[in-house]
Image (cartoon, rainbow, N blue to C red):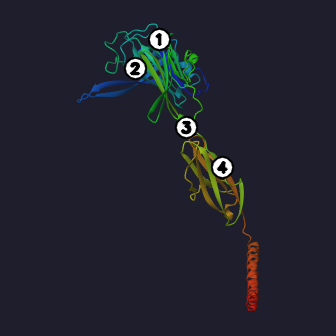
Amino acid sequence: MSLNVNILLCLFLCGEVPGIQSFEQVPWLPCQLVDESVTFNDEGHAETEYQHRDAGLQFGHPGDSALNPNTITFLVTGSKVDMRKYIEGVVEHQLQCEIRRYSTESPQMRWPGLGAQEHDIWFTCTIRHTDGVFIITSFLRHTPATPTPGQAHYLNWAAIADRAALTTSMKQQSLHCQFDVDHKAADLTVEWRFQRRGERTTLFSHSSRSGQTEGSGVPLNAIGRGDASLTLPLTKQSSEGTYVCHVSVPPLFGSHDITLQIMESPRVSLNVDSTISLVDRGEQKVVCEAEGYYPLDVEMEWFREPSGGGLLPEKLDTVLYSSHRHHQDGTYSLSAFFLLHASLHDSGSKYFCRVSHSSQRMPIRKSFTLNVTEYDSWNAALWFFSGFGFILVMVATLFVMLPRLSSARKANQRKPY
């Protein structure tokens, strides 16, 4: 079955998309139609069942045959709004497409576009990049050959047969928040909201009908070009939360959530140089310091890599950790340390501290090489005996001096005053 649809409004939320090829060359995109049916149980409560059905978006002209006759085809025909311009440079396998029914939740009204009817049926088409680069929501309008009595909503959906074809039109959404409408002088409302810890704040709102604007961050001339991207001031931890972009053109309303997480990468350092030298059986405390990271979650580990290579690094199990230290700027620090016991067979080994944090794709490594020299017993003996001899001399001196001091004291006591 093929349904002719038109794209009316597109809302686009995205990051940066690398250029690969023009998506306009792709005539068909596989999708899932998430259909729903509502029934009432014995207690009168509504219960919704969802059915995932194979579907596809086909870009073409009215009357085109379905490229895949075994699925429900949404034939996207000529419209001033084209979702494909927002996903240039992306290949098909990087996209996930989902189509759902949409209710305007308002008295039936005619969309102010060419060919629209009061009994049109609406759908939303959401396309996501598999790596989270962007999300696009488009509104698809289908004019059925036979109008469905009453208003289209979840209790009165028009049935769609398997292998049906619908001709539709589209809308789209993203962050930056960009949008496109298929007619000029639209009754447009743009709004940005911020949600954090249960509190909601309106950051920006603009109504084209009243001309009223509140807040800041979105240039009005950009809205006229279909760009409602919000510019944030210098971000800090209090900027973390969910940002919601709302675009409304009655009777359609679209929104996308953008979760902003602040991240600071740790600065990692050691308290030793890149090479340290110890004598056999010597000891030294070695400290790995991770500073200035956010959020709190961090993993620090110490490893020993034997000299000569060929062996896997061995994780040290004698490592101790400080408590997390919270700084005034909101970042954290943590220390991981151990007492290094030098031995000759460890000479040439490399020790490295590995720090993993959500802000880093790869762990940070800081290392040092241990050189161990043999314990010199002769020099040690000389040192020992030289020190011991000094002690003997001091003791002998005291034995000689004490009697003389005692005699002098008695002589002083016998002298008359």
Q: Position of residue 305 (x, y in %)?
A: 64, 55
* Residue 300 to residue 406: above or below: above
Q: Earlier in the sequence, mark 4 or mark 3?
A: 3
Residue 237 - label:
3
Kind of element beneath mark 1: loop
Number of the front mark, 4 or 3 = 3
Look at mark 1 in the image and give the residue it sits on: 64
Look at mark 4 in the image and give the residue it sits on: 269
* Residue 56 to residue 332: above or below: above
| Camera-nearest residue between 23 and 12 | 12
| Camera-nearest residue between 333 and 116 | 333
Q: Earlier in the sequence, mark 2 or mark 3?
A: 2
Q: In the shown orientation, is residue 152 left or right of residue 337?
A: left
Q: Position of residue 223 (x, y in %)?
A: 55, 17
Kind of element beneath mark 3: helix
| Camera-nearest residue between 267 and 331 | 331
- Which class describes the residues within 10 Å of circle 4: few (<14), some (14-19), or many (20+)? some
Q: Earlier in the sequence, mark 4 or mark 2?
A: 2
Amino acid of disc 2: Tyr
- Which class describes the residues within 10 Å of circle 3: few (<14), some (14-19), or many (20+)? some
Q: Visible in this render: residue 185?
A: yes
Look at mark 2 in the image and give the residue it sits on: 102
Query: Distance between the Cα atoms at labels 4 and 2?
Result: 55 Å
Q: Earlier in the sequence, mark 4 or mark 1?
A: 1
Contact between labelled residues 2 and 4, with CB atoms less than 8 Å apart: no
Q: In the shown orientation, is residue 136 left or right of residue 380?
A: left
Q: Position of residue 79 (x, y in %)?
A: 50, 11
- The residue most toward the left is 42
